[in-house]
Amino acid sequence: MARFSGRIVTFAIAIILLCASWCGAMELLAPTDGQAVRERVKIQLPLDDVPDDGFISIFVGEAEADKFVVAIARDAAISENNVLTFFWNTKQPYYDSAQPMQPKYFKDGRYQMMVQAHDAKGKTVSSAKLTIVMKNQVDRPSPAPGIDLVNRMTFGQTNDYRVRCDVSVFEIVNRVGLPILGGMALSGEVLLTQSIEDVRPAGEFLIRLRTDEKTFVSSYGVKKYLYAGQELKPQLYRLVNKYGSVIKANMFSKQAKYRIMDILPVLSAGQKKEGDSWPDTVTLKIDGLTPFITLKGSAMLDSFEWEQGRECAKIKSIVLSETPISLANGKIKSTGPLNADVTTYFAYKSGTMLRRDIRLTFDAEITPDSRDEAGGQLPGEEGPDSLPGEQLYPFSDDDDIAPAPSPGLGTSHGATFSQGVTERGPKKGRVELVVVIRLEK
């Protein structure tokens, strides 16, 4: 289903919406005026209020100072009984044109919300305003008691985590980030299955991590499944304790070539209250996109929020790595430390991580080619059997060993640029990786 998203599209749409004239009042069925909302808000309106091939836009904020937060295509809605149902996640970031690289979030409180319907050309055809009360925070007594943060696992327990990574590259001009490599659209996704194979004394667990055959990377609009049809896919056994600290990263030498990121959050013994902090380690590896990255820093219990309908400890971490990395066959090379802001939603009553958002940024030297400036594939380029210009990281990431091409891609395609592509001089820029790890079951 189509949906407008991304900072570039966001600001382009915002300009259209602000300039468009509107007429007619919208019959907004939900939410109602003054309604308390949290997490995903259901927005309902009559089927005929949104033109075919049109979309709705949502503005939230104070009176006369509301912010454009999202535009959602009509075909992304659920249509039933002549009613269109859209969903907006109140916890998703929005971006200000004055600071386009800095995500912002709405705090709990009372806001004015405006919903507009538009035709396919962006003209506003109807509009409605109301007041909503955001309540994503969990109500707790004052003074609030401390809580234990412990990963609780049982023998045979299995959890699936969906990991999604999107890469954005910006050239910094007069302190403003201008997107480049737009046609590259680097992204990747993997489903990691974590199963508990053994429960040992003193709160130690033998966990098995494995990837699925639908792991893919996408570059220049071309999607490639890395392990489709392969009998052996990356997997390993890892020994950890109940606080998420790794005792042994890979228990068996036959699987030594595999490296898989940690899913469990690193926690700390003893009861914790808001504001308490502890040392933290976060690992990151997206097959086909990144090497294995280890980031160290500190974590803090920030607050308590609802996530997926459950009470969660919201843990914020600031971590970094001084180890340089390169992406996209060396077209992107880091020139400074890797800095990451990490937000973890931990269901402390069940001891389960529900979601983790990672925003990794670093300064880089970028070498674009004519594809990047043209915004996609050039005539006569290779088709869906290759991922032009992409350096892949499927398995081992030893410093002395160059990363091997991912299975099925072929060195003649995946490791070199296509003929007819002109490389340009390097530019200084900034790279952002947005990674979302979400529990599916």
Image: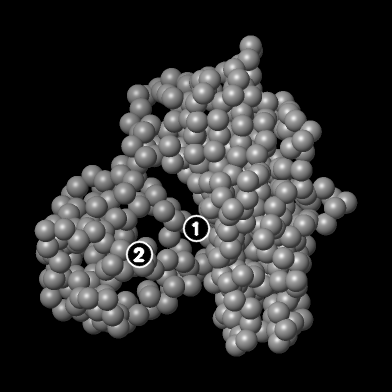
119 over 34 or under it: above or below: below
Along the line of sight, the residue nearer the viewer: 292 or 252: 252
Circle 2 packing at 10 Å, graded few (<14), some (14-19), many (20+), is few
171 over 263 or under it: above or below: below
Name the residue located 26 percent from the left edge and 61 percent from the top edge. Answer: 77
Name the residue located 61 percent from the left edge and 70 percent from the top edge. Answer: 385
Residue linked to disc 1: 103
414 over 435 or under it: above or below: below
Tag 1 secondary structure = strand
Horizontally, residue 171 falls left or right of residue 311, namely: right
Along the line of sight, the residue nearer the viewer: 338 or 174: 338
Residue linked to disc 2: 1
Of all residues, the one furthest to the top in this rendering is: 201
Tag 2 secondary structure = loop
Along the line of sight, the residue nearer the viewer: 21 or 119: 119
Which x, y percent locates residue 142? 37, 24
Which mark is nearer the camera, 1 or 2?
2
The amino acid type of the residue labelled 1 equals Pro
Name the residue located 56 percent from the left edge and 34 percent from the top edge. Answer: 194
The chosen color scheme is one colour
Res. 137 visible in picture? no
Which x, y percent locates residue 322? 78, 50
